[in-house]
Image: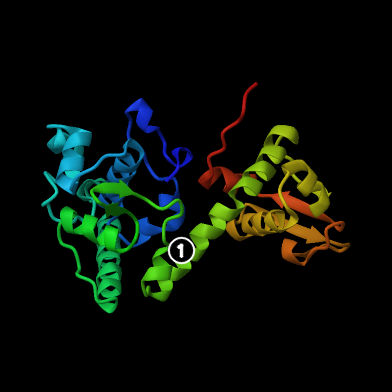
Amino acid sequence: MTTEQATETASEGGMAMHTDWWTSGWNHVLPQHQGMMLCLIFGTATTRGLEGDLDGVVHEIFGDELRGVFHSLGENLDSPILWIDEEEVEDAESEEEKDELRAAAKAHEATLTSALQAAGMTVPVTIRELAHTMVELGIATTRDGTWSMPEVLPRPDDVLTLPDDVLTRLQRMRQFTDTEAADQAIVRHLIEDLDYPEEVFTSLDRFVAITGEGIDKVRAALDQLVELGDARLYRGDPQVTVAAKDLPAHARFHLVPDWERFNEHRMHITREG
């Protein structure tokens, strides 16, 4: 793992999180919060060049404040794996929402259990065992007492057999990640340059020039806007609905944003200066 892949460097004495953790999709397969915490520990051990077993590394990072650091995640490495956030359940606004959270947690646990069993691996029940599982999966390695992480984390769907609904979720998550830069550039143009237009008559070539992104990324980002309900694309007279993936680069089309829907589920940060 390179310095650029951590949120803070070892020289700063801070914690280091591998930036590929979210893109990899492991939070959809492993216990979300405890898996992320262990990735943070592995990343910090890697960037600081720490040596020793897991207990020694954890003590070197956190000192005697382990209980305070783990907080609701567990008292120590031998605490049980948690699949549900009880505080989130308590904050749920209805019994139906609570039942949905509990059902999702059970499905999440079943996904990892069945995948590990199919791979002939032991199903972890404690944080310590989860750390060993993550090492077995290649998320982190320890050689001669030195910890390291690969620059690109293994993808869960490459090393485990996962159910179709999880595979679909991972594919969708990666699609959003892949189109994020083009998506945000288009949104900034519509908001900051055009001041929330009711309609834009434009082309893919123009969006490529404005965003600095490749035409395939622009096509995917526009079709994603349509899929989310944030905009519609039309062409012709009378107007017919079109998809960006079917448009020639030079073809002019109408982009009609749905600002009410957009503002309901999006957060936009305006640049200053």
Answer whether residue 83 is visible to the viewer in this image.
no
> From the viewer's perspective, is residue 40 above or below residue 204?
above
At horizontal 86% and vertical 64% (from top left) the residue drawn is 238
The foreground one among 117 and 229 is 117
Residue 55 at x, y percent in the picture: 15, 45
Residue at x-position 42% and y-position 75%: 164
The quarter in which the C terminus is drawn is top right
Q: Which amino acid does the dot numbered 1 rest on?
A: Leu
Which of 16 and 229 lies nearest the eye of the viewer?
16
* Pointer 1 residue: 170
Could you tell me if residue 75 is visible in this image?
yes
Quarter of the image holding residue 245?
bottom right
Q: Closer to the camera, 59 or 17?
A: 59
**252 to the left or right of 143:** right
- The picture places residue 139, in percent across and down from the top left corner, at 34, 56
The percent coordinates of residue 31 (x first, y second) are 27, 57
Residue 210 screen position, x and y as percent: 76, 42
Q: Residue at x 27, y 72 (%)?
A: 116
Residue at the farthest top position: 273
Instruction: Looking at the picture, tell me which residue is in the foreground, 90 or 108.
Output: 108
- Looking at the rendered structure, the secondary structure element under dot 1 is helix
Q: How is the image coloured?
A: rainbow
Residue 55 is left or right of residue 205, and the answer is left
* Residue in the picture at 42% in, 36% down: 7
